């Protein structure tokens, strides 16, 4: 297996409480890998460890064969591993085009010179429009981000993430707070952008997980409870007891 992201013995303790305990995880290149579990399972802590927003107590993390255990999030992003957040992070007073343009400026190392003329910044427009089209927001190019629906704000966030040209995309509950129409639209978007990228996502919506994921890791009490495709993990008695529960569809 060609694992682009790998954790070995990943452990995080908070003043004696073990939130993540000796987790071994391998995310295969080109796959959609879901990290799920009940509340308090440690999945958010694990996700923050993998993306380096938390430093592990013990264990190692490698990305594309390189040890990133002690690296900062910004340095990891420059290697091609970029995360989104559970709460949409866009500039509400900027247009959709301007939001993506900011991301393109950052990727190319330019300063955020908002005071430049539109003509001076227009060199980013063609590429920005390509990313906007990729997430289905072409008809909202000149719309203020703050006026978008929640689901479309998440699509814009993905467009700004794609502007950084990541090899691997880490999504923190991409469907959180969405209605069914936005869930379906975002699921289709994730499937489309996964054609040439690796995706690791934390997600509560089990239908989305079942539809999208090549592999699922189930956490409970900070440890891996089960791993495999949805058909495999959904039939595990341990998973049913710890996560799915009696009477779950």
Image (cartoon, grey):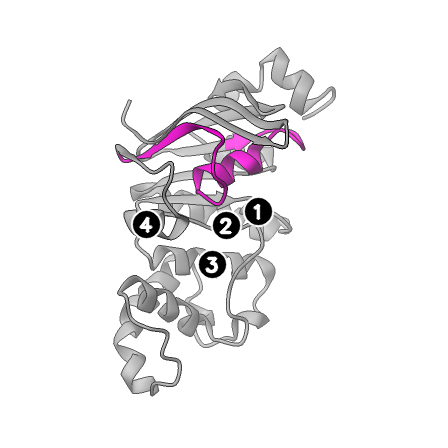
**Residue 197 image position (x, y, % from top left):** 32, 42
Which span of residues is magenta-colored? 35-64
Picture layout, residue 67 above or below residue 144? above
Neighbor class of circle 4 (other Cα within 10 Å; few <14, some 14-19, many 20+) is some
**Label 3 to label 2, Cα distance in Å?**
11 Å
Task: Identify residue for label 1.
Answer: 175
Q: Is residue 179 magenta?
A: no
Q: Nearer the viewer, mark 1 or mark 2?
A: 1
Q: Is residue 61 above or below residue 111?
A: above
Give the residue at x 51% y 16%. 232
State the mark number for residue 157: 3
Q: Which residue is mark 4?
A: 166
Q: Earlier in the sequence, mark 2 or mark 4?
A: 4
Taking depth in this image into account, of 102 and 23 the one nearest to the observer is 23
Depth check, front residue: 9 or 203: 9
Is 58 included in the stretch rendered in magenta? yes
- CA gap, disc 1 and disc 4: 20 Å
- In the image, taking residue 142 as reference, residue 133 lies left or right, namely left
Number of disc labels: 4
Q: What's the distance in space between the residues labelled 1 and 2, CA to CA?
A: 7 Å
């Amino acid at each position: 297996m060609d694992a682009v992201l790998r954790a070995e013995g990943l452990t995080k303790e908070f003043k004696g409480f073990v939130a993540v305990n000796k987790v071994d995880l391998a995310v295969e290149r080109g796959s959609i890998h879901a990290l799920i579990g009940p509340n308090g399972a440690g999945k958010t802590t694990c996700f923050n460890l993998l993306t380096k927003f938390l430093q592990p107590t013990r264990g190692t993390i490698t990305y594309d064969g390189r040890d990133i255990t002690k690296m900062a999030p910004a340095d990891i992003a420059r290697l091609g591993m970029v995360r989104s957040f559970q709460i949409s992070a866009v500039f509400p007073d900027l247009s959709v085009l301007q939001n993506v343009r900011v991301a393109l400026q950052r990727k190319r190392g330019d300063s955020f010179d908002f005071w430049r003329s539109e003509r001076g910044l227009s060199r980013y427009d063609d590429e920005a429009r390509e990313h906007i089209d990729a997430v289905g927001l072409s008809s909202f190019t000149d719309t203020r981000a703050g006026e978008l629906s929640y689901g479309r704000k998440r699509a814009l966030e993905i467009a700004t993430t794609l502007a950084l040209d990541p090899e691997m995309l880490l999504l923190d509950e991409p469907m959180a707070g969405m209605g069914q129409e936005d869930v379906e639209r975002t699921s289709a978007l994730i499937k489309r952008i996964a054609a040439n990228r690796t995706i690791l996502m934390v997600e509560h919506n089990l239908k989305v997980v079942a539809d999208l994921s090549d592999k699922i890791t189930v956490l409970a009490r900070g440890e891996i409870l089960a791993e495999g495709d949805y058909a495999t993990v959904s039939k595990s008695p341990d998973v049913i007891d710890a996560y799915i529960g009696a009477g779950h569809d």
